[in-house]
Image (tube, rainbow, N blue to C red):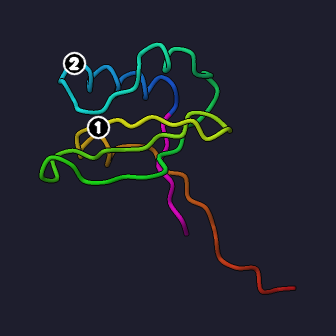
């Protein structure tokens, strides 16, 4: 099983607003988030621990063309993101 964390527009707006308010090093421009489709899920494609493990720097894919933004969030927030589980077990029946 592969697990992929993701956000929707509402959750990304909340996390981004918090990051801006707290002066995080990486945020996404507010207008960029506002223009995102409300019916789309945006996957977290890359992560790294930041600020001595207190934060996670996340790369969020914003569209099907591969546009992305980086955002810093508390480890607790990152751990609470929804997860999509994908069964990547090879099909050996053929």
Q: Percent position (x, y) of residue 12?
A: 43, 28
**Residue at mark 1:** 72
Q: Percent position (x, y) of residue 19?
A: 26, 26
Element assignment for label 1: strand
Q: To which quarter of the image does residue 86 belong?
A: bottom right
Q: To which quarter of the image does residue 2 belong?
A: bottom right
Q: Percent position (x, y) of residue 68?
A: 51, 37
Q: Earlier in the sequence, mark 2 or mark 1?
A: 2
**Residue at mark 2:** 21
- 76 relative position to 61: left or right: left
Residue sitting at x 56%, y 58% = 85
Q: In 3D space, how far apart are the residues under numbered discs 2 and 1 (Cα atoms)?
A: 12 Å
Out of 86 and 69, give the one closest to the viewer: 69
Residue sitting at x 50%, y 19% = 32
Residues shaded magenta: 1-7
Q: Is residue 24 above or below residue 44?
A: above
* Label 1 packing within 10 angstroms: few (<14), some (14-19), many (20+): many
Majority secondary structure in the magenta region: strand
Residue sitting at x 23%, y 32% = 25
Quadrant of the rendering where the N terminus is positioned? bottom right
* Label 2 packing within 10 angstroms: few (<14), some (14-19), many (20+): few
Quadrant of the rendering where the C terminus is positioned? bottom right
Magenta run includes residue 6: yes
């Amino acid at each position: 099983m592969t697990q992929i964390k993701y956000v929707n527009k509402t959750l990304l707006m909340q996390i981004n607003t918090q990051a801006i308010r707290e002066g995080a090093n990486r945020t996404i421009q507010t207008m960029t988030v506002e223009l995102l489709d409300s019916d789309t899920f945006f996957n977290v494609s890359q992560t790294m621990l930041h600020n001595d493990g207190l934060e996670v720097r996340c790369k969020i894919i914003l569209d099907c063309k591969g546009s992305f933004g980086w955002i810093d969030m508390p480890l607790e927030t990152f751990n609470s993101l929804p997860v999509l589980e994908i069964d990547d077990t090879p099909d050996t029946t053929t």
